[in-house]
Image (spheres, grey):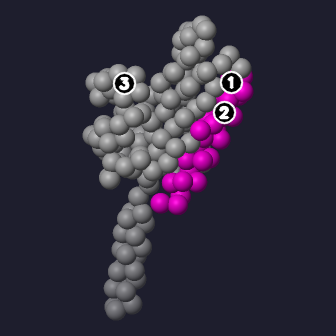
Amino acid sequence: MTQRIFKFILSALLTLSHHAVARQRVAVLDFELNDSTLLPNTVEEQRRTESLRPLLEQALLQKGDYEIIVVNAEAQATSNAGFGYLFSYHDLAAKLAEQFGADWVIVGQHNKPSFLYSHLIADLVYVNTKKWVSRFDIELKGTHETVTRHGVSALADKITKRLVRQ
């Protein structure tokens, strides 16, 4: 009888410990386009920038055991007082993500100073403390979809390595 009780308690403890190690909940906000070329904000570049959030979410899911938290566009627009606002004020980005139950929020910009290259810049913010943790910068040489996907994958690698250290 005592062996049965011992097995039951051991099984219960293992089940509880498995659930205690919850997946990290990561929110990725829509990237903003900061295009300072002579022909800024073309439809193609806007589409490319709009593709960054879903591509990054997919890449993070492939690289780690994360739960992706969706922050709807309306809530993000309401919290964003203007271009670069949430990117500059990490505490406000964290408050936004906190409303949706995220542990982490990634706030990004797609900076395009030239027709030849652009940069993905992403800040990782810990929602609990509302503090900036890391900044990641990936250079994209060209505008092809392959370049964009490769750059987002490299960004996801860097973010995953940082999250693992937490």
For the point 61% across and 9% down, the residue is 38
Q: Are marks 1 and 2 in contact (CB under 8 Å)?
A: yes
Callout 2 secondary element: strand
Q: CA distance from mark 2 to mark 3?
A: 26 Å
The residue pinned by badge 1 equals 117
Q: Which residues are magenta?
A: 137-166
Image quarter for residue 40? top right
Callout 1 secondary element: strand
Kind of residue indicated by mark 1: Tyr
The residue pinned by badge 3 equals 73
Q: Is residue 26 left or right of residue 110?
A: left
Look at the image and say whether residue 154 sits in the magenta stretch.
yes
Kind of residue indicated by mark 2: Glu
Q: Which is more toward the observer, 106 or 131?
A: 131
Tell me which numbered mark, 2 or 3, is placed earlier along the sequence.
3
Tell me which numbered mark, 3 or 1, is placed earlier along the sequence.
3
The residue pinned by badge 2 equals 139
Kind of residue indicated by mark 3: Ala
Q: CA distance from mark 3 to mark 1?
A: 27 Å
Tell me which numbered mark, 1 or 2, is placed earlier along the sequence.
1
